[in-house]
Image (cartoon, rainbow, N blue to C red):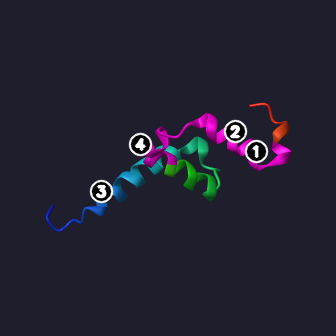
Amino acid sequence: MFIIIPVTSCTCERTFSKLTIVKNKLRNTIGQERLNALLFLFVEQELTNSVDVNSVIDEFKHSFPIKRRLVL
């Protein structure tokens, strides 16, 4: 049985498992785009933990002139 299951099914199983954590009863009204973004962040934690949050915030402030008024 285990020999015929492709390796990629583990990733699929893990993703659906994390989906149930992200989309619970309290967040049932969440939009699809936001759900996809949250699920990506949750599944790819190793990748996202290496990102410097302060540099992302600075880049965001410089990319959108109207957002410069935000105090972060």
Rendered position, 57 above or below 11: above
User: Residue at left 85%, top 37%?
Assistant: 69
Q: Neighbour class for label 4 at 10 Å: few (<14), some, many (≥20)?
A: few
Residue kind at label 3, given as amino acid type: Cys
Q: Is residue 27 left or right of residue 64?
A: left
Residue kind at label 1, given as amino acid type: His
Q: Neighbour class for label 3 at 10 Å: few (<14), some, many (≥20)?
A: few
Callouts 2 and 1 close, C-beta under 8 Å:
yes
Residue 55 pos. (x, y %): 62, 38
Disc marking residue 10: 3
Element type where label 2 sits in the image? helix
Residue kind at label 2, given as amino acid type: Asp
Cα separation, mark 2 vs mark 3, equals 37 Å
Residue 26 pos. (x, y %): 59, 41
Residue that protrudes farthest toward the bottom in the picture? 4
In magenta stretch: residue 12: no
User: Residue at left 62%, top 57%?
Assistant: 33
What residue does disc 2 label?
Answer: 58
